[in-house]
Image (spheres, helix red, strand yellow):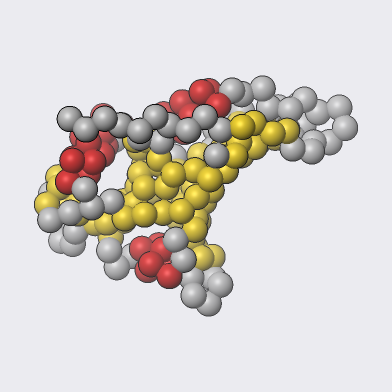
Amino acid sequence: MAEREPEPEPVAERLSSPSGSPLTSLTWLDARTRIAEGEDYLVATSGPNGRVHVVPVLAVWLDGAVCFNTGRDARKARYLAHNDSCAVTVPGPDVDLVVEGTAHIMRDAGRLQRVAELFPTKYPWWHPFVQDGEFHAPGDADPRHVFAVKPAVVFAFGKEKGFSATRWRF
């Protein structure tokens, strides 16, 4: 098995907050764990005409990236073909996380297989399989692209005691 690259350790920065509001006290490890264990994800993309598209997706964390899938003809796939910059949000009860980065289509069969094996552990009702560099699933007529978004910047926005924020740069 090939050796995996270690995930980069980002630098935390405090963002301005209203006077008297505490800044988010999450460590990067805490934030990464929340991203990995999240169940709800929203992906924001932008099309050639500048129109923004935000949609929920199923996602997992693998090798330092948020991995999600979509139909190859879905609007988000078309928009990412035009502009690969995107944001993935992970809402939480006390902190909302926003991952900004670049989405890349995954084609490596080994990595795709690892992602496919992670989905049913999080979403027991969905069991994709890998064929010809894409996901397929029972009942789906069309193959699905799998995208990996490695963070360039991650924001944490606290909800308690006023708004607080932290930014990690990679």
Camera-side residue of 24 and 168: 168
Give the side of residue 9 with respect to residue 142, left or right: right
Asked if residue 92 shows in the view, the reply is yes
Camera-side residue of 58 and 85: 85
| Quarter in which the N terminus is drawn | top left
x and y, in percent, of residue 54 in the image:
49, 57
Examine the rendered structure and indicate whether residue 143 appears above or below residue 116: below
Q: Residue at x 21, y 48 (%)?
A: 108
Give the side of residue 18 with respect to residue 157, left or right: right
| Quarter in which the C terminus is drawn | top right
Q: Residue at x 42, y 47 (%)?
A: 149
Residue 132 sits in which quadrant? bottom left
Residue 92 sits in which quadrant? top right
Examine the rendered structure and indicate whether residue 122 appears above or below residue 56: above
Examine the rendered structure and indicate whether residue 95 appears above or below residue 130: above
x and y, in percent, of residue 115 in the image:
26, 39
Q: Residue at x 84, y 36 (%)?
A: 18
